Amino acid sequence: MSVSSSATQRRLAEHAPRTWQRMLSGRRLNLIEPSPLDVEIEDIALGLSRNTRWNGQTTGPHAWSIAQHSDLVVDIVRRLKPRATAKLLMAAKLHDASEYVTHDLITPLKAVVGDVFKEVEKGLMRAVHIRFGLPAVLPAADVALIKKADRTAAATEAVQLAGFSEAECRTVLSFKEKPLKDLKLTPLAATEAEKRFLAGFRELERAIAVQAR
């Protein structure tokens, strides 16, 4: 462990006397030094299906969950790169996986929280990637593609669910990407969102195994 890494962990530890969370799977996930062995997809699916995008400020009887957002990003990556590998699609599906622990902090709040949040988030994402056979740090081209899909998804959500106009997506939210108009977003009950997220994960898991042969 490097000196800088040790200093970072000490600084993070100062923020809370207990730095692990118990998951329903029984795992104890240490937020400062997360082990890939303590990451379970069932815990991720449960957390993401119960955590909301836009701080819950969306239309409809159900919230738009991070789980549904993640599945939408996968669909958009497929549009942007029809021959995307299963590993790239898995990276897209898990691009917000850390939020099963950290929740989806809206951009203004992230700015207030600052570096501590970013450090925890990065550590969790590294553990998630390693757990599911992805590079600890994704190639820059993959990061850029997933980010473009993420912003396209966000713009679509903003217009359809969060009360923003298309013009406000550019002027207020600073999205260069345009919202999709050829699909309708339908927020699901958390149990259904969880089920679909897990089903999509298993499908990609099988595809990765096939492509690895």
Image (cartoon, grey):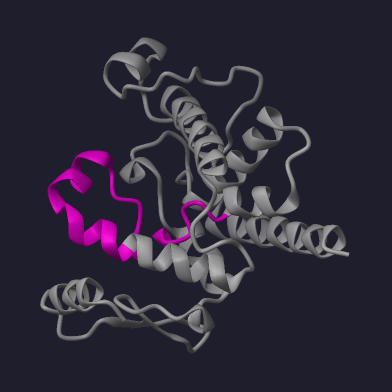
Q: Quadrant of residue 164?
A: top left
x 36%, y 10%: residue = 167
Q: Is residue 115 magenta?
A: yes
Q: Is residue 131 magenta?
A: no
Q: Quadrant of residue 17?
A: bottom left
Query: Would residue 49 be found to the left or right of residue 197 on screen?
Result: left
Residue in the foreground of this view, choosing between 33 and 18: 33
Rendered view: 33 above or below 186: below
Query: Would residue 7 be found to the left or right of residue 40 on screen?
Result: left
- Residue 208 drawn at (x, y percent): 78, 60
Query: Would residue 193 be found to the left or right of residue 39 on screen?
Result: right
- Residue 63 drawn at (x, y percent): 45, 46
Rendered view: 9 above or below 207: below
x 78%, y 37%: residue = 83
x 40%, y 44%: residue = 53
- Residue 206 drawn at (x, y percent): 81, 63
Quadrant assignment for the N terminus:
bottom left
Quadrant assignment for the C terminus:
bottom right
Rendered view: 61 above or below 34: above
x 44%, y 22%: residue = 159
Report the residue that reaches farthest toward the top. Answer: 167
Q: Quadrant of residue 184?
A: top right
Residue in the foreground of this view, choosing between 83 and 19: 83
Range shown magenta: 94-120
Query: Would residue 113 be found to the left or right of residue 146 on screen?
Result: left
Q: Main secondary structure of the magenta part?
A: helix
- Residue 35 drawn at (x, y percent): 45, 81
Rendered view: 113 above or below 181: below
Total marks in image:
0
Residue in the foreground of this view, choosing between 91 and 163: 91
Report the residue that reaches farthest toward the front. Answer: 2
